[in-house]
Amino acid sequence: MQEFFDSTRDNFISTFLVEDRWQQLLSGLGITLLITFFAVIIGIILGCLIAIVRSTYETNVKTKKCLTFGDYIIKVLNVICKIYLTIIRGTPVVVQLMIMYFIIFANSRDSILAAILSFGINSGAYVAEIIRSGIMSIDKGQFEASRSLGFNYKDTMIHIILPQAFKNVLPALGNEFIVLLKETSVAGYVAVQDLTYVANLIRSRTYEAFFPLITTAVIYLVLVMILTFFLGKLERRLRNSDH
């Protein structure tokens, strides 16, 4: 038993204390959070734009017989959005990450920027469909009522439709952001020294897998629990605002 405790203590020391490896883990955690934060922002912006284009086509353009010049633009944009969604959702995020780093960023080799763009673009495809489903779930009478009050289509979307759609899809959006946080663990494929990459690096140097990998799993678990907690509070606050 004493031998077991001595071995565990030595493994703990070599994993966290030797060469200040705990600081390497903190640095990796910081990079993971950095990539996740900016990827979420890109995903939300891209997803909202695509959702608005697709829902506009479904509600305003698709049923029209006489199309204006603006309608044709929306129609073309909708085709582009559908191609984007098909490609992004039909290919693995790891492959997208490697294409971004080894092909698109072949000259600069900025691994962190490549990871942010890859995960953001990938997340945007899923966020777009989530938000689009939320927009399409709003009763069409809302559009008609807003038009009767003098709102144009843009103001209707911004002030009436999108706030309601956001409330409806918040749980699904929260799940997407949690998945995105965990998906960043593959960023090490392009030499991004994120949390998982650093843990695996420590494992390769110490020949001890338990503490690096279990610590990484616990950190991700805590991050997900914190994110779930705040998303739950936001959801309850939005629900209470309806009363």
Image (cartoon, rainbow, N blue to C red):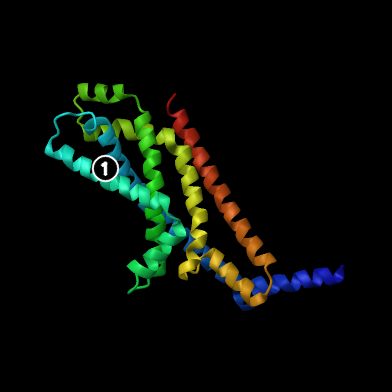
Q: Is residue 50 visible?
A: yes
Q: Quadrant of residue 91?
A: bottom left
Residue 144 versus residue 48 in the image, above or below: above
Q: Residue at x 42, y 26 (%)?
A: 242
Q: Which residue is mark 1?
A: 78
Q: Is residue 43 visible?
A: no
In the rendered image, the quadrant that contains the C terminus is top left
Q: Position of residue 69 (x, y in %)?
A: 12, 39
In the rendered image, the quadrant that contains the N terminus is bottom right
Residue 170 versus residue 6 in the image, above or below: above
Q: Position of residue 151 (x, y in %)?
A: 21, 28
Nearer-the-camera pick, 183 or 157: 183
**SS under mark 1:** helix
Q: Quadrant of residue 148?
A: top left
Nearer-the-camera pick, 203 or 38: 203
Mark 1 Cα shell of 10 Å, populated few (<14), some (14-19), many (≥20): many
